[in-house]
Amino acid sequence: MNKNTIKSPPRETIVGGTVDSIKNHGLFSTFSSGCQYMWDAICDTYLDRKMGVRGTRRIPTEKLGHQTDENHFHIASDYRTFKKIMKLIDIDEDLDVFLDYGSGSGRILVLAGRLYRFRKIIGVELVEDMVELSRRNISNAIKTGNLKCEDIEVSHTDASEYEIPEEVSIIYFYNPFSGSVLRKALRKIRKSIDNNPRKVTIIVKSPEHFEREADDFGWLVKQAVMGRGIRYSFNIYLAE
């Protein structure tokens, strides 16, 4: 298994939102970030249509039918920053297996398959309607012929109960859940590593909840921080 070396990220600062952004970066920088957000939205819409991906907009928690606040609303990661963060990782396309917790509509599963010839790509999703949607999106994307990896599966299961395959080496979180669900998922990751000792890279977008729990899991070692604001902030951890 490869070591998933973390490269040095661009020098950027995480801030909490618009007010913090103006305070820390000034009005011009905040305005530029807003323009970038709008441009990303346009590009995301174009690429979604090109790949046959639907249902990527924000879906409130109550519409997903979650029973607790620990399971969060759905919104798909944007293409640009996902590509940017993945460039920090040395990927072995013949060995690495990519897993997305809370894979939602499947946009990141499709993008991962478009960018990299992973050995396999796995999504874990609790909501049945989202599982069905993501499977349709994956099927549409495969039909375009633009995927380097077509071995993509979506597991309809609770992340706190999901047994992680022992070949998984890169794990992606976009703030899908918190609290006890997150803690149980982290214990499952630890169990998988114990069963098959290896290095696992964990990418966390919008890491506020994850950071709170990571302090209690000493085997999670923060390797890099990138971005600013809720939409564009990332932490990268190495677990072994």
Image (cartoon, grey):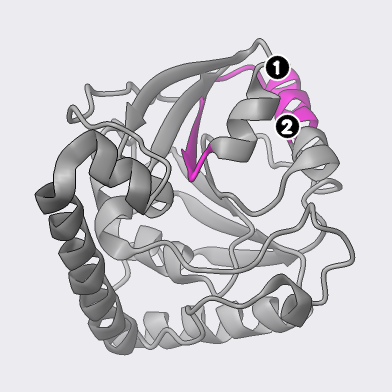
Q: Which residue is mark 2?
A: 186
The answer to whether residue 78 is seen in the rendering is yes
| Image vertical order of residue 195 relative to residue 168, above or below | above
Separation (CA) of disc 1 from disc 2? 8 Å
Horizontal and vertical percent position of residue 194: 74, 18
> Left or right: where does residue 75 sit relative to residue 176?
left
The magenta stretch is 186-207
Q: Which residue is mark 1?
A: 217
> Left or right: where does residue 128 sit relative to residue 91?
right
Residue 202 belongs to magenta span? yes
Q: Quadrant of the C terminus?
A: top right
| Image vertical order of residue 117 relative to residue 154, above or below | above
| Residue in the foreground of this view, choosing between 204 and 155 | 204
Label 1 close to label 2 by CB (< 8 Å): yes
- Secondary structure at badge 1 equals loop
| Residue in the foreground of this view, choosing between 205 and 161 | 205
| Image vertical order of residue 41 relative to residue 29, above or below | below
Q: Quadrant of residue 198?
A: top right
Horizontal and vertical percent position of residue 130: 66, 78
Q: Which residue is depicted at the point 16% across and 43% down? A: 26
**Image mark for residue 98:** none
> Left or right: where does residue 168 sit relative to residue 110?
right
- Secondary structure at badge 2 equals helix
The answer to whether residue 3 is seen in the rendering is no
Horizontal and vertical percent position of residue 87: 23, 40
